[in-house]
Image (spheres, rainbow, N blue to C red):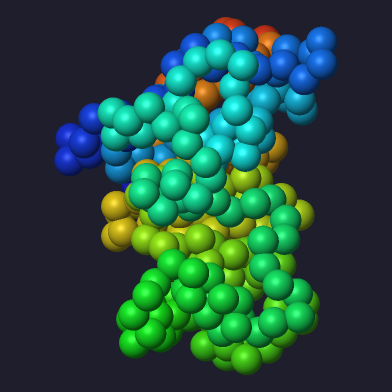
Amino acid sequence: MSNIKKFRIISFKDKKKILKLEKLSIKFGKKVILDNLDLGLSKGQVLGLLGPNGAGKSTIFNLITGLIKPDFGSIIIDNNNVTKYPVYIRAQKFKIGFVPQSGGYFHGLSVYQNLKAVAEINIKDKRYQEEKINTLISKFELDNVRDIKTILLSGGQKKKLVISMALISSPEILLLDEPFAALDVMTIKMLQKIIIDLQSDDHISIILCDHQARDLLNCVDVAAIINNGKVIAQGTPSNLINNTEAKNAYFGDSFNVN
């Protein structure tokens, strides 16, 4: 299996569940989106979510961040039930960062101004604000576009900026909604490396969902297939692609990652 990731679920990772979704259920009108769904994220893990359109992947992110509430079930972060907590408490106290599929930045502001806007909300010390901004600009190689309006950036630069903005608050859990959508091959490889570095260097636990199954499987430790509101299969990428239920619901018989 050809992949960018050099390690998966090896001994140094903490097996403690930093995030647990327990029996989550939600419906919009008469349509059931999630049906007693159980899912967990271990500390230091990169978890990928796959599934057909309408399976509920983005709904899971909206529930974790607090943008919507479940009809039933619990969201547990570090053994705290946060189901009834508003968005800002989950983001600030429980250190959740979110990178949306598109947008997430101010079009008319420069890279620096976007980061500054987020830093002023999350960091009180002005000197530390500047230190954090400069560190992220350097880390994500945005120095040469520091003062360029974001509307003029490439797709890859915009994605790096939005990830940088999510990292201003030093999250412990980072949610990435379709990070590889509409990007070229080289930019996808760059983002895969960023995801792996966030895990290994910054010790961030990550959940990402994407329809680019091969690209997702090449940078996660574990992936889960969501279908009909439930997790129908879960495991390491090599195990998952050979799972009968995963094949029937999502991959098909001819799928491979090479």
> Residue 20 at x, y = what percent?
39, 25
In the rendered view, does 217 fall on the left or right side of 80?
A: right
Q: Decide which of 9, 2 is in the foreground and name it.
A: 9
Tally of numbered discs = 0
Q: Residue at x 47, y 36 (%)?
A: 85
Residue at the image position 56 percent from the left and 38 percent from the top: 66
Q: Quadrant of residue 226?
A: top right
Q: At which x and y percent is residue 225?
A: 58, 21
Residue 123 can be seen in this image: yes
Q: Position of residue 62 (x, y in %)?
A: 61, 37
Question: Residue at 59% of width from left, 22% of height from top?
Answer: 70
Left or right: residue 228 versus residue 139 is right
Image quadrant for the C terminus?
A: top right
Residue 22, above or below 43: above
Residue 241 to residue 92: above or below: above
Between residue 148 and residue 86, name the one nearer to us.
Answer: 86
Give the vertical position of 195 relative to 29 (above or below): below
Q: Residue furthest left?
A: 12
Q: Position of residue 16 (x, y in %)?
A: 24, 30
Residue closer to the observer: 20 or 71:
71
129, above or below 199, in the image: below
Decide which of 70, 212 is in the foreground and name it.
70
Q: Residue at x 68, y 88 (%)?
A: 148
Q: Is residue 238 visible?
A: no
